[in-house]
Amino acid sequence: MAQNDDHRSRQLPSMYTAHDEFLGASSGLTHDSSHPQHCTPSNDLLSPTDALPDEVLSQIFQALILSSIEDDGLSQFPPQFTLGAVSARWRRVVWHTRNLWEIFSMKVTASTLPNVVSMLRVCNENRGVLKGYVALDMGGIDPNASKTPRELLDELGSAMFLSADASNFHSLQLHRPPTYWLRSLRKNCSSLHHLRLSWHPWWPDAATGDRGPWRKELRVQLPWQNFTTLSIHCVPVNVCIELLKGCPDLTCFESYNIQNTAGNHHPPFGGQENSPITILTKLQCLKWDSQQLGWGPLLGWDAYLLGFLEFPALQHIAWAFPPAERSSRNTFSQFISRTTHHIDTFELIGSHLVIPWFKSLLDILGPRLCNVICTGFPPSALPQILSMFEQNIIHFPVLRSLKFASARRDRMESSLFIESINNLARQRKQGGTGKFYFEVENLNVVWSLPDRALMSQVKGDGFHLVIKHDGSSMDL
């Protein structure tokens, strides 16, 4: 280990130089080449962080770097490089704290593409044998554009998946990657447990169906062992099903904006009566949004998934329903009736047109249902949904959280639904649940002071009430 540290120390001067080149020589730091571990700032100004020990500073950095992959938009530079450009001391802490390099995240654009490979290699070398978490947003690159240097994409793909570092990748999050990368990903990322792949519906590869590269490059015919989390967006429906069936160790599977393609109008095996049952014994979370498929015969894929795949450990299910398609709702209701003793979290992705059916479904789920999530509903549906729970709360003895994610960011007065929330919270308190959690997302709610005061009266006597608005807890 000492030899490795010495090797890294000898490389620091060139890394510092590369760091400034990556950031356009904007860090304002100078280096003493004879003592690379001691950099001097270009000014003598001190900040409050100078009083913090290095260990505390590195923990703050680690939290910031972790949050970088949780944000909706990635930065054009990995956060380690940005942090290291603030001051000489910050740079030293970053370079000498190995676990800060477990995560590599950035948005790749035409202007940053030439530097990505160098940044990735620096990150891999500093990380050593630690598990790797890589998040790349390739949305700023069109692999088919004449101005995109194919050799740079090849070099980045090789650095990602053809080097020895590929075997250390534990988690990959790739948005719009070149699909020819997928074969090397599948072959060489032997320690991979979590994968998120996403494209746009209008992206050329997303409409090529069986002529497209997914089935061939991901080698869906082979089992994918030790793989626990898979999230795929804008992938043909047959590939979604084959991947789900081919990952026996999955605990969470998400598929959104599932694509219909030529030749995929019907599930496999021709007739469902001849289809074998596939049992995924470890799957606990299933999220399936097939609204892009359309209606009619294409919904046979939904029926196939629910009728010929079994999930004995399922706890969380999210499902989308076309508003006018009753056959899909009936199939789902039958599925829920068979698995009701397992599921404690239900997420409905839909519109106000499915609310009447939603109530009948909740009656089936009620006794075990702890958490309900309503996604993609118009804002006007919130008072309806809350009133439905309020009037039928006896059917939900263990309900402890309710989340509403609006389809539109409209303005809404809290007075339109505060009475229902207040009654729900009081009923939960009397029922002895100990805590009730309510969250609204993507909705511009105006919370008046009287409404806040009304909710704060419910708290106390061992009962905790948490209300969140767009991820932030309200002060009641």
Image: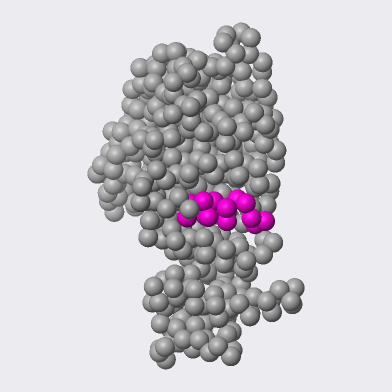
Judged left or right of residue 246, residue 103 is: left
Q: Is residue 327 visible?
A: yes
Judged left or right of residue 357, residue 133 is: right
Q: Is residue 15 magenta?
A: no
In what quadrant of the picture does the C terminus appear?
bottom left
The residue positioned 42% from the left and 45% from the top of the image is 143
The residue positioned 66% from the left and 15% from the top of the image is 276
Judged left or right of residue 290, residue 130 is: right
Return the x and y of residue 420 as percentages of the image width and height.
Answer: 36, 36
In what quadrant of the picture does the N terminus appear?
bottom right
Q: Is residue 335 above or below residue 92?
A: above
Q: Is residue 256 visible?
A: no
Which is more toward the observer, 223 or 398? Answer: 223
The residue positioned 44% from the left and 73% from the top of the image is 21
Q: Is residue 385 above or below residue 128?
A: above
Q: Main secondary structure of the magenta part?
A: helix
Task: State which quadrant residue 182 falls in.
Answer: top right
Look at the image and give the residue range highlighted in magenta. 152-165
Q: How many marks?
A: 0
